[in-house]
């Protein structure tokens, strides 16, 4: 019989991952496993794999892998679910967790209803706006220390793009008619644009008012997802920098709402949203 692997399926606003407890199980090849389990026809079906691991210096360590097997630095929706998992499985009894990620240490404050963890507020840290650190290359002829509403040509059409990193790179485009976009056609062209040497996540944003925006997201290595936490944070930062919203904004994604605050006192971005367990299961390797 093949070796059994215990897992938990969880989702944050429909951004769903398979979570594996690395405190008592070992995954030899997480990239290959992510490719297998993410398949929605022949696997479990998910936006990727998240390993919850011991950390030498923090409460836990989080590693996440996309459906194509590539490892991502961070995921805002996934880290909320990590907080819930750690609490629900008795790994920690703390209401505030320090989680080691590929994008640095993130602070996760659990939100409870009736004693049950239903969500979290995550200190996502300061946004990275310096192009070389995103990383992104300024378009030819552009100058300055920010990639702010700069013209980028994709498939023969020019877009005003704002680039932000929240530990992973994002390209934010403000436009009308986001529901009519053929994202599977245009998304990969942004993702693999030569201005983004490590590829990029891409958010297409429609402003509702100064306190609310709507977005669709194409995630590198994944495709369109129902939600992206780091993407929502990047959108909130870009919205403020472009004078379209204030520092506190509700971001409406296809999977639901996230509340984002870019605090002017410490410069950090705070994300609040739900975390939900779908089911526990066993996958045979």
Image (spheres, helix red, strand yellow):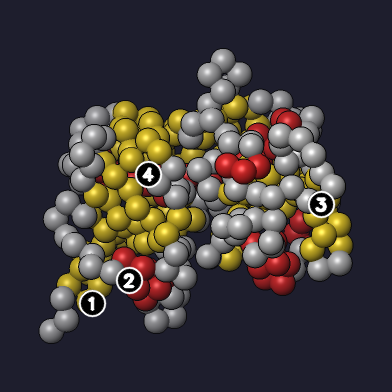
Residue 228 position in % (x across, y down): 55, 50
- Say which element carries label 3: loop
Q: Which mark is residue 285?
A: 1
Q: Earlier in the sequence, mark 3 or mark 1?
A: 3
Marks 2 and 4 sit apart, C-alpha to C-alpha, by 19 Å
Q: Residue at x 23, y 65 (%)?
A: 27
- Judged by depth in the image, the label closer to the viewer, 2 or 4, is 4
Q: Secondary structure at mark 1?
A: loop
Tell me the tag on residue 110.
none
Q: Are marks 3 and 1 in contact (CB under 8 Å)?
A: no
N-term mark: 3 or 2: 2
Disc 1 and disc 4 in contact, CB within 8 angstroms: no
Tell me the CA gap for discs 4 and 3. Answer: 34 Å
Q: Are marks 1 and 2 in contact (CB under 8 Å)?
A: yes
Q: Residues within 10 Å of mark 3 (few under 14, many from 20)?
A: few
Tell me the residue that label 2 is attached to.
33
Query: Mark 4 falls on what kind of element?
Result: strand
Q: To which residue does mark 3 refer?
A: 140
């Amino acid at each position: 019989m093949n070796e059994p692997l215990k897992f938990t399926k969880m989702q944050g606003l429909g951004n769903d991952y398979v979570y594996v407890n690395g405190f008592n199980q070992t995954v030899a090849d997480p990239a290959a496993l992510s490719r297998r389990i993410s398949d929605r026809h022949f696997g479990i079906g998910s936006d990727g794999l998240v390993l919850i691991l011991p950390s030498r210096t923090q409460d836990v360590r989080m590693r996440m892998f996309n459906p194509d097997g590539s490892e991502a630095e961070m995921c805002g929706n996934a880290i909320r679910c990590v907080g819930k998992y750690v609490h629900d499985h008795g790994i920690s009894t703390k209401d505030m967790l320090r989680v080691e990620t590929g994008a640095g240490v993130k602070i996760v404050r659990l939100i409870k209803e009736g004693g049950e963890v239903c969500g979290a507020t995550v200190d996502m840290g300061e946004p990275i706006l310096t192009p070389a650190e995103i990383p992104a290359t300024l378009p030819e002829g552009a100058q300055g220390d920010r990639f702010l509403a700069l013209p980028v040509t994709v498939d023969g059409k020019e877009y005003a793009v704002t680039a932000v990193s929240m530990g992973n790179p994002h390209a934010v485009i403000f436009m009308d008619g986001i529901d009519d976009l053929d994202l599977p056609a245009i998304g990969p062209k942004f993702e693999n644009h030569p201005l983004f040497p490590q590829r990029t996540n891409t958010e297409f944003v429609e402003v509702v008012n100064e306190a609310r925006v709507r977005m669709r997201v194409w995630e590198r290595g994944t495709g369109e997802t129902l939600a992206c936490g780091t993407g929502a944070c990047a959108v909130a930062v870009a919205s403020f920098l472009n004078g379209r919203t204030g520092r506190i904004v509700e971001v409406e994604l296809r999977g639901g709402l996230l509340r984002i605050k870019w605090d002017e006192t410490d410069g950090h971005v705070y994300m609040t949203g739900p975390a939900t367990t779908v089911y526990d299961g066993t996958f045979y390797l």
